[in-house]
């Protein structure tokens, strides 16, 4: 049933990332399940691509490079009010196209999504009852574990989802070392409310990669501590409190807050 591997990198479904994945060996491909955050339509020469152009291009590239690779897909970075020229919700179009091409994927939902987004996922679930769904929580969500549990239960009830068929991804975004202990405490409290062991899998993601290279001299070697790995190790040690050992995820070598740049005018 589309089981996840132990490493969940969060990436963009851009052609460069997709091409890089396609070049990996079969053994390497088996070791990870990427989560693709559908990025905002790019700006080229001062003009932003339309949402129609953007989504259709992503589908073409996924079909070209990832036809046999399971992945998680999320559509939360783009303005949720945007619609395609014919009025279709872009997420609806994306999921319908991937499904029609028999591409193996897991859609994502979160407690921060609007009703239109939830309706699209509900329709997908009704048509594909055996397809897993990923519930993605953010650091702000788990800061209030009791409130988060109420909202999680509301979403699960609305979508008629069983946690045993869902992957629970907790995305802490950018973290610093002094935040690790409080995150573990929040995970422990949330586990008491929704019982992580009842979910298909638990994924813990974060990043300590800086927003830019300011302060790092050109042509130099610098080490950047991987606090996301420290967080994951702490969660493994605290698994008796958390109730389940999480899979590891990160943002590779980018900051979670990716800048929105014009490819034709930016300087490398």
Image: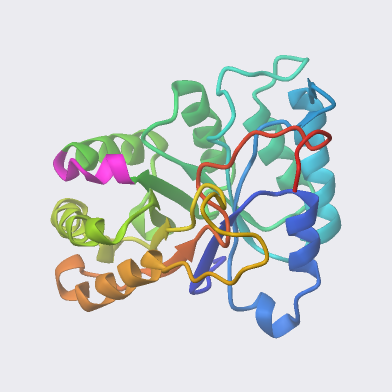
In the image, 50: left or right of 125? right
Image quadrant where residue 89 sits: top right
Q: Give residue 223's position: percent from left, percent from top.
A: 49, 71
The residues colored magenta run 139-146
In the image, 128: left or right of 27? left
Q: Residue at x 58, y 61 (%)?
A: 253
Q: For the N terminus, which image quadrant? A: bottom right
In the image, 220: left or right of 54? left
Front residue of 186/156: it is 186
Residue 213 is a magenta residue: no
> In this view, which residue lies farthest toward the bottom?
27
How many labels were placed on the picture?
A: 0
Front residue of 127/245: it is 245
Q: Give residue 122's position: percent from left, percent from top.
A: 49, 34
Residue 144 is a magenta residue: yes
Q: Give residue 252's position: percent from left, percent from top.
A: 57, 62
Q: In this view, does 89 lie above or below 74?
A: above
Q: Which residue is drawn at 49% across and 61% down?
A: 250
Q: Give residue 113's position: percent from left, percent from top.
A: 44, 30
Q: Which residue is drawn at 53% across and 39% down?
A: 126
Q: Which residue is drawn at 47% across and 64% down?
A: 249
Q: Is residue 189 above or below residue 46?
A: below
State the colouring used for the structure image: rainbow
């Amino acid at each position: 049933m589309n089981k996840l591997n132990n490493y969940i990198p969060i990436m963009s479904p851009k052609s460069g990332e997709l091409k890089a994945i396609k070049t990996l060996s079969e053994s390497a491909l088996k070791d990870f399940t990427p989560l693709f955050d559908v990025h905002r339509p790019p700006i080229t020469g001062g003009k932003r691509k339309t949402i129609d152009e953007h989504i259709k291009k992503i589908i073409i590239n996924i079909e070209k490079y990832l036809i046999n690779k399971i992945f998680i897909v999320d559509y939360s970075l783009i303005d949720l009010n945007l619609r395609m020229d014919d009025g279709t919700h872009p997420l609806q179009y994306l999921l319908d196209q991937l499904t029609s091409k028999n591409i193996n994927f897991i859609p994502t939902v979160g407690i921060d999504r609007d009703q239109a987004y939830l309706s699209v996922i509900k329709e997908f679930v009704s048509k594909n009852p055996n397809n897993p769904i990923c519930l993605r929580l953010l650091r702000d969500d788990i800061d209030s574990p009791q409130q988060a549990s109420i909202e999680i239960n509301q979403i699960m009830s609305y979508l008629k989802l069983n946690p045993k068929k869902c992957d629970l991804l907790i995305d802490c975004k950018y973290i610093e070392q002094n935040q690790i202990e409080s995150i573990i405490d929040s995970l422990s409290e949330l586990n008491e409310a929704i019982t992580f062991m009842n979910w298909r899998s638990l994924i813990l993601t974060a990043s300590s990669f800086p927003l830019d290279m300011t302060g790092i001299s050109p042509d130099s070697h610098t080490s950047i501590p991987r606090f996301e790995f420290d967080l994951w190790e702490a969660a493994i040690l605290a698994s008796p409190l958390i109730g389940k050992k999480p899979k590891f995820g990160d943002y590779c070598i980018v900051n979670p807050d990716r800048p929105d740049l014009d490819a034709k005018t930016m300087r490398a």
